[in-house]
Image: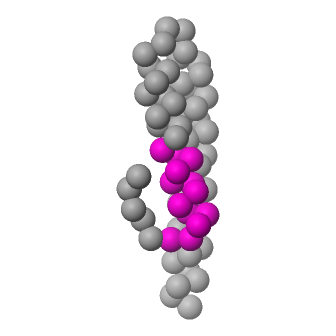
Amino acid sequence: MSYEAGSKECRHLIEAKESLLSAMESLSNINSTDILQIQIKEIYNKLELMHDNRKKIESATNIN
């Protein structure tokens, strides 16, 4: 897992995203999983937005 400073919430988001990437990689070797891969990618993108928002909140908190 790559290291990124931040809260436990950020670390959990990173872990969740990495797990989804692993799942997508595994599914890429299985026939007829295209729809599942798309759904997982959509969830990954939502987690990415949550992570970006969390980083903004933490940055604002650390500046003040």
Based on the displayed image, in which of its 4 quarters is residue 50 positioned? bottom right
Position above or below: 29 against 57: above
In this rendering, does residue 8 appear at all?
Answer: yes
Image quadrant containing the C terminus: bottom right
Residue 45 locus on image (x, y percent): 55, 43
Q: In terms of secondary structure, what is the magenta stretch mainly?
A: helix
- Is 11 in front, or is 37? 11
What's the magenta region?
6-18
> Looking at the image, what colour scheme do you see?
one colour
Based on the displayed image, in which of its 4 quarters is residue 4 positioned? bottom left
Name the residue located 53 percent from the left edge and 37 percent from the top edge.
20
- Count numbered badges in the picture: 0
Q: Seen in the image, is 22 located left or right of residue 54?
A: left
Residue 43 locus on image (x, y percent): 61, 39
Magenta region includes residue 8: yes
Position above or below: 5 against 39: below
Residue 17 locus on image (x, y percent): 52, 46
Name the residue located 51 percent from the left edge and 30 percent from the top edge.
23
Q: Residue furthest left?
A: 2
